[in-house]
Each structure stands twice: as structure tokens, then as C-alpha cells.
Amino acid sequence: MNSDSQKIGQRAEAKRTSWRRVWQFVRPYRWALLVAVLGVTLDAAVQGAFALLLQHILDDVFGRHDPFYIRVIPWAIVVLFLLRGIGNYVGTYGVNWVGRRVIMDIRDRVFRKYLSLPAHFFDSHPAANLMARMTFDIEQMALGVSRTVIVIARDFLTIVFLLGVMFYQSVQLTLIVFAIVPLVAWIIAYVNKRFRQISHRIQQSVSGVSEVVEEVVRGQKEVRIYGGQAEELERFERINNDNRRFNLKIASIQAASSSLVQFLAACALAVIIYFATRPAYIDQITPGAFMSFISAMLALIPPLKRLSDISSTVQRTLAAADSVFYVLDQPSEQDTGDKAVPETALDLRFHGVSLDYPDGTRALHEVDLEVPAGSVVALVGQSGSGKSSLVSLVPRFYDPTEGQVTINGTDLRDYRLDSLRNRMAYVGQNVVLFNDTVANNIAYGSAEKYSREAIREAARKANALAFIEALPNGFDTPIGENGARLSGGQRQRLAIARAILKDAPILILDEATSALDTRSERAIQEALHKVMKNRTTLVVAHRLSTIENADKVVVFERGRIVEEGSHQALLARGGLYAQLHALQHARNDVSPMPNKGNQAT
Ligand code: ADP
Ligand code: MG
């Protein structure tokens, strides 16, 4: 019991916190919001004024034929509704103006967050989910706030003004209304809720006509071959009939509900008329005043209804807000280092590095590896052995769980992230291209820095020039979303051109040529060899022939280094590497790495 009330308390506290955070986004536009609230105030005031005016229309225009009112009332109506129109416009537009501003601001914040979140966040959150937060949830949150503000302000004020009119016309009748209306409202709410429950239950029990039809359409061959027509028809007719009956039941409940509600409202009205017409009272109120009172009372119903519904809007708004704040609360990438990576040749080392992914997979076990400045180290091993994991530590996509990675003896975490990443080029397993032109994709991130000549030269080295020039607009051809118009091999060549253009001292190639056929690969290979020269290079090779010139070959198995040495030395040793090599050569050097199944250990 105690812990329950505690939990409720915590939830209420969490709600307040969410509102406060939502308000932080609205706060800069509070003056615009105030104008909007003034607009809806005008709107609400006119509703009250019109109810008052009714009294004069009935008593003075049609009752006494008073020339002043006869002249003034038509104008008064026109002016009042002009004011109401203006108020409504200012209120609705103002609230949307604020809402749209807030949406833009929050989207900006979330987008910045997405740019700064670490890789493991994206591993555990599907892209579709992150997209939904950006589009749907933010919209829901900001418009929910606007809606809440306008409903609360306008409807609350409308109720206040209408009650004012009622009190003005008759205090006694208003008190009677106060006595009976809550009772009637409670009955109506209860009846509506019960009816909704019943029709919901019926709706659930209606097994869909479409389900049966879909089954028959999908299984039409089976139905025919096994002679299921009669059986299916019987089943369908039963469901078709059930469907009709259930839906009719729902219609009957709904109709009964609205009849009952009307009846109850009429009873309430009858009670009020009964009291208004008691002999002691009937002379105190004119027909106009009575109509004015009744019309104010009836006009109360829609705003009351909206106010009572507001809690579901608030709930949805808060749920959406929490989903947005969840993203904003994620820690960004750790960037606490303050050193700049030196301009000299860079020496890369892994000291007893282990890596656990957040899901618990241990991808690397105490790996020690040296990549001396200017040398090429090739990583080989079957898929899943940890090669990509190792190279992803260098740009600090992940940080090691144990051990450290150093450049020139300094832990990577002591360098500034931008300085570190600026000094390396990376071609990953999955080439990602942007919805832009070929040239801008090659020069991605610093398009204004490179001349067209330099871009062209990089493309030439990456063996991409021929296909680029065959495109309708050459380097200026848009390549569509994620390069949809290019083949796998063409995409890889663009990625390689990108890396060549960056001309960084550390080069990481993770199966950068896997989608190329043997001939294109040979053609780039030479260029890559030239590019690797005098650079600190880690290359994950999927065809062994591509790494015969590496200074050192490292063989991975289940996250550990099992062999290390030059190509020749490893061949001579006759171990795992020699076996992989023999297998590939038997396949004429075109197949990818063998998988575990055909590999002797
Ligand atoms: P390789 O590049 O040699 O094929 P990886 O380094 O990609 O191997 O994978 C090594 C191990 O780590 C595999 O068991 C793989 O399932 C796991 N792994 C890779 N990336 C992730 C990740 N983002 N989250 C969880 N586990 C991962
Ligand atoms: Mg890999």
C-alpha cells in the first residue's frame, strides 16, 4: 500500500518534470503564446456576449419593439462575430506559430544529438525507431502542448463567461443547475463508458470477414485441388452473418446511448423549467432572460466535453515528450581528451585490448598488435573473428573494455575526437553514400576544400573515372538515396576515392574491395598499394591475394590473434594462414574467405 502510493507519487513527480521540460522549449515564445491566449479570450467573451444579447433580441426587439434595439442589434451581431473571427484567427494561428517553432527547435536539438551519439546507441536502436521519434513523437508533443493550451484557455474562459451570464440572469436557477448538472453529467459519463466498453468487446469478438477471404484468396490453389469450396463457403456464410449481427448490435447500443443522453439532458432542462415557473419566481424572469440563461447553459456543454477529454491528449503528449527526452538524455560520445594528434608519422598500437559489446558479446580477447608508422598490417580470419571490431577501435567508434589503443604512445582517449578522426580515412564494409552528386560524395564533409581536379584524380586512382564519366552528368550526377543508382562495386570505388582524397596518415580498409570482381579489384589494388605507401594502414582483406605485399599479416580467430608474420613466413609455417591460402588458390582466387564449415583447425 505504502509502496503503491510512493509509486503514484513518483509518477506524478515524473509528469511534473516532463511538463517542466516541455515548458523549457515553449518558454522563449511565451509572449506569442500570451497573444494567442488573448485571441481565444476574445473568442470566449463573444460567446458570453451573444448569450446576453439574446435577452435583448427577445425582450426588447420582439417583445417591446424598442426602436433603439431594432436599429442596433443587427450591427451588434455583425461586430461581435467579426471580433470572434479575429480572436479565433489570432488564437489558432498564434498557437500553431508557437507549436511550429517548438517543433523546429526540438528537431534541431534531437538532430544534434543524433550526430553526437556513440555507435553503440545506434546498435541498440533501430533506425525506424529513431526516425519515428524525430517525426511523429516531436509533432505529437508540440501539437499536444498547443492543443492543451488552447483548449484549456479557450474552453475554461468560455465556461467562466457563460457562467457569468447565467449568474447575471438568475442566481437561483444557476444554483439549481449546479445541483442537478453534476448528477446528470455523472450518469451520462457512466452510461457512455459502459456502452463504449460493450461495443469494444463486441468489436473484438467479430472475427474479420477479411481474414477468411484473405485465406481463401491466398490458398486458392489448395482450395481447388482439395475441393474445399463447400467447406469454405459454409464457414464464410457463418462469419458473414455473425458480422452483420454484431455490427447491428453495436449500432443499436450507440443509438440507445445517444437517445438516453438526450433524454437525460431533456429531463435536466425540464427540472429547470419546472423551478423557473414556480409562482414565486415566474414573474421575476423575462422570457428573454430565461432564453439567454438556457442558451448559455447549453453552450457550456461542448467546452465541458473538450475539457473532460483533455487528459487523454495530455497523456499522449507526455508519452511523446518522454520518448523525445529519452534521446536527449543519452550521453554523447566521450570527448574529454585535449591533445591534438601529431603531424608526424603515426604509430598505432593495441595493448591487451578486449572489447565487449553492450549485448555482452566479447569480440576481442586481449589483443596485442603493433602497426609501426608507415607500415601495412593486414588482418585475415573467418567472418565473425573480430577484424571489424578491432579496426573500429581506431576511430573510437567503440572504446576498449580493457587495455588501450595508442597513437605515438598516447591513449586515443587523450586526443580530441575531431583531431583523431581528421587524421584517418576509413572505408567500411557497408559503403554509405549520401543523396548528393558524385563529386560531393567523394569530397564528403569538406566539399569546398577540394578542387574538381583533385576529386577527379582521386576518382581516377580508385578506378572510378570511367563509370563516372559515363553517367549523364558526370561528376554532377545525383546518385539518389544511398547511391541507389549504383552497383555494389561502383559504390565501393566511390568510397575508396573518398579515402584517397582525404589523404590521411592513417588508413583503414575493412573489406573495401569485397564487392568488386577480380579484375576491377586488381586494377584498384595497384592504386591502393600506392596510397598505402608511407601511411599507417590496417587492411582487412577478404581475398588473400590482396595482402601479399603487407608488411605483416595477422590471423584472427574468435577474437584472438593466432598467427602473425609476413605472408612468406606464415606460408612457410604451414598453419591456419597456409590452409586458407591453399583453399583460396584451389578456387582460382575468386571466392571469398572460406567459412568455418570447410576450414580445418
Ligand atoms: P569480422 O569483421 O571479423 O567478420 P566482427 O568484428 O564484425 O567480425 O564481429 C566479431 C563478433 O562481434 C561477432 O561475434 C559479431 O557477432 C559481434 N559483433 C559485431 N558487431 C557487433 C555489435 N555492434 N554489437 C554486438 N555484437 C557485435
Ligand atoms: Mg567485418
Image (cartoon, grey):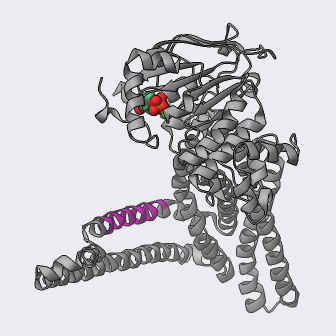
Q: Position of residue 388 (x, y in %)?
A: 52, 29
Which of the 4 image quadrants contains residue 468?
bottom right
Q: Position of residue 582 (x, y in %)?
A: 39, 30
Relative to 88, say whether 479 is above or below. Answer: above
Which of the 4 image quadrants contains residue 256?
bottom left
Relative to 443, say whether 272 is above or below. Answer: below
Q: Is residue 439 visible?
A: yes
**Residue 205 in the figure: left or right of residue 12:** left
- Image quadrant occupied by the C terminus: top left
Relative to 93, say whether 295 is above or below. Answer: below
Q: Is residue 514 in the magenta section?
A: no
Considering depth in this image, is 296 or 142 the residue closer to the camera?
Answer: 142
Which of the 4 image quadrants contains residue 242?
bottom left
Q: Residue at x 42, y 36 (%)?
A: 585
Q: Residue at x 57, y 62 (%)?
A: 306
Q: Is residue 12 visible?
A: no
Q: Residue at x 70, y 37 (%)?
A: 527
Please state the extent of the stretch shown in magenta in the rendering.
182-200
**Residue 229 in the figure: left or right of residue 166:** left
**Residue 321 in the figure: left or right of residue 560:** right
